[in-house]
Image: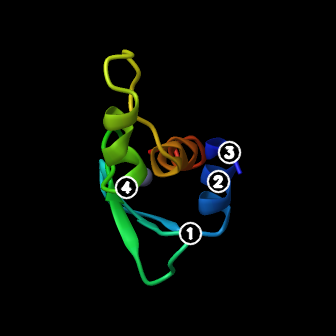
Amino acid sequence: MNTIRKAKKLVESGSVAQIEDDLFQIKSSSDPNKSYFVTSDTCECHGFRNFYKFHHGKGLKANCSHLEAIRIFKQENPS
Ligand SMILES: [Zn+2]
């Protein structure tokens, strides 16, 4: 499953909860007992933290399904 589709699924299943203006809690799709705290540009999941290791020096911005989920969530719930 690609990142965007995974992100949409997280939003649709109600796994995204807004805690503060720029702080969200997202339930892990693989482990329902686990959740990640995510802001608009950082995430504490493995994929995000490993991104720079795998793509070091390519000038890419780290991304993960959780960051995408927040983008979708914000579009659907404009403040
Ligand atoms: Zn993440």
CA separation in Å, label 3 and label 4: 16 Å
Q: Residue at x 58, y 44 (%)?
A: 72
Label annotation for residue 29:
1
Q: Quadrant of residue 44?
A: bottom left
Q: Residue at x 39, y 34 (%)?
A: 54
Q: Is residue 19 left or right of residue 4?
A: left
The residues bearing labels 4 and 1 have C-alpha atoms spaced at a distance of 13 Å
Residue 2, quarter of the rendered image: top right
Q: Secondary structure at mark 2?
A: helix
| C-alpha separation, residue under disc 1 versus residue under disc 2 | 9 Å
Asked if the residues shown at circle 1 and circle 2 are in contact, with their CB atoms under 8 angstroms apart, the answer is: yes
Q: Position of residue 24 (x, y in %)?
A: 36, 58
**Left or right for 27, reference 61:** right
* Ligand 1 within 8 Å of the CB at mark 4: yes
The residue to which callout 2 is attached is 6
Q: Earlier in the sequence, mark 3 or mark 4?
A: 3
Image location of residue 62, percent across then percent down? 39, 33
Describe residue 36's horizontal placement relative to residue 4 as left or right: left
Q: Are marks 3 and 1 in contact (CB under 8 Å)?
A: no
Front label number (4 vs 2): 4
Within 10 angstroms of label 1, few (less than 14), some, or many (20 or more) residues?
A: some
